Amino acid sequence: MRNENKPKGWNEIKTNDSWALFKIMGEFVSGFEKLSRIGPCVSIFGSARTKPDQKYYKLAVDIAEKIVDNGYGVITGGGPGIMEAGNKGAHLAGGTSVGLNIDLPFEQHDNPYIDADKSIDFDYFFVRKVMFVKYSQGFVVLPGGFGTLDELFEAITLIQTHKIDKFPIILVGTDFWKDLLAWIRTTLLDSFKNISDADVDLIYLVDTADEVLEVLNNFYNEYELSPNF
């Protein structure tokens, strides 16, 4: 393509893309340096829109407290709703409380229960998701929206394709997750054969904080705690 036929601003776009690499690298370096020191943690996911008077907020607080009491720290997306509940439970139990924050147009703001030295800001979703996977020893997933589903299925895919080591993925709330799991089993597995039985076995479904800890502890009776890649 001759230069005079290129879209207006073409060269500026190419230059900005190149310089963005340094910002991306900076986010990776900062995240790796801070999170490599925190020890074994469990990530808690769920809707930013869940209110403190709702049952899943209260359950997330309870789950996080029990996670800390069992020797793990807690990582969340750093925002309100279920994320806040997870950090609150970790804070109340006196454990490690990490927030991986990202700027969103309507929902995201830092919650007050993150440890001051463990609040990390990201501009790029993909960098943030790397941090969740690399430094989590398990995912606890409460009811949420598209973002929660994105994080859930990315973790399942990475484990399924052996890009990371297996860790427990625990869905909390039968009333919320049962139809999705039924579709996975009947449509993806039985009807279309797009996944295997072993892929379904990656997912646990529970309803209580004690069940979450039972899954975590049973899993790590067989495996050492370590980063995932």
Image (tube, rainbow, N blue to C red):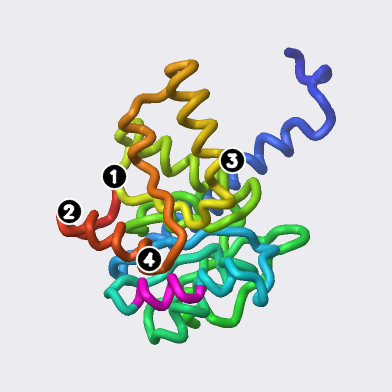
| Mark 4 neighbour density, 10 Å: few (under 14) some (14–19) many (20 or more) | many
Indicate which disc residue 18 carries. Answer: 3
Q: Please name the amino acid that badge 3 sits on.
A: Ser
Comparing marks 4 and 1, which lies closer to the viewer? 1
Q: Is residue 42 left or right of residue 77?
A: left
Estimate the x, y position of residue 113 in percent, counting from the top left: 54, 81
Q: Which residue is mark 4?
A: 35
Please tell me which of labels 4 and 1 falls first in the chain.
4
Q: Please name the amino acid that badge 1 sits on.
A: Lys
Please tell me which of labels 2 and 1 falls first in the chain.
1
Q: Is residue 76 left or right of residue 157?
A: right
- Image quarter for residue 46? bottom right
* Label 4 secondary element: helix
Residue 56, magenta (yes or no): no
| Mark 3 neighbour density, 10 Å: few (under 14) some (14–19) many (20 or more) | few
Estimate the x, y position of residue 165 in percent, counting from the top left: 27, 44
Please tell me which of labels 4 and 2 falls first in the chain.
4
- Image quarter for residue 82? bottom right
Indicate which disc residue 166 carries. Answer: 1
The secondary structure that most of the magenta stretch takes on is: helix
